[in-house]
Amino acid sequence: MPKQILVADDDPVLLSLYTRMLAGTRYAVSRASSFAEATALINLNSYDLLVTDLMFPDGVGTDLITIFERKQGCAKCILVTGSGTEVNLKQIPSLAGYFEKPLNAEAFMAAVTKILA
């Protein structure tokens, strides 16, 4: 069974980019375009990795990570931000990767592969 990844970002262009980058890999990808949609998917399904934006119109990615950590005991997350907001990465135990936008596709895919190995 392929590893399950949930990608959450309110930018449709970035959701498409994630889909293209992960197409043809051994991973199954679910997409969420809002905090509420991502929360619903987390509550309904099990994922091996959450990739989330920091800022959503209806929530914050760090809160989404907390929800994910509560549902998935050994959660692994990648946080992506373009906001320039300071994030205390030490307060997020499941954080396995942190990227700033614009996203470096090679580094992102290397991190996904390493995390899910």
Image: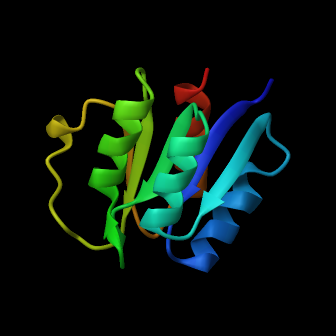
Which residue is located at x 61 percent, y 39 percent?
A: 45
Q: Is residue 49 left or right of residue 89?
A: right
Which residue is located at x 51 percent, y 43 percent?
A: 43
Q: Is residue 13 left or right of residue 76?
A: right
Image vertical order of residue 1 relative to residue 95, above or below: above
Q: Position of residue 42 (x, y in %)?
A: 52, 45
Residue 46 visible somewhere in the drawing: yes
Tell me the quarter of the image containing the C terminus.
top right
Q: Position of residue 52 (x, y in %)?
A: 45, 55
Q: Position of residue 68 (x, y in %)?
A: 41, 40
Q: Quadrant of residue 95?
A: top left
Which residue is located at x 53 percent, y 37 percent?
A: 49
Q: Is residue 86 left or right of residue 108?
A: left
Question: Looking at the image, which residue sits at the far right?
Answer: 24
Tell me the quarter of the image containing the N terminus.
top right
Image vertical order of residue 40 relative to residue 75, above or below: below
Q: Is residue 53 left or right of residue 11?
A: left
Q: Position of residue 27 (x, y in %)?
A: 74, 37
Image vertical order of residue 70 relative to residue 64, above or below: above
Q: Quadrant of residue 105?
A: bottom right
Colour logic: rainbow
- Of residue 93 and residue 40, the one placed in the foreground of this image is 40
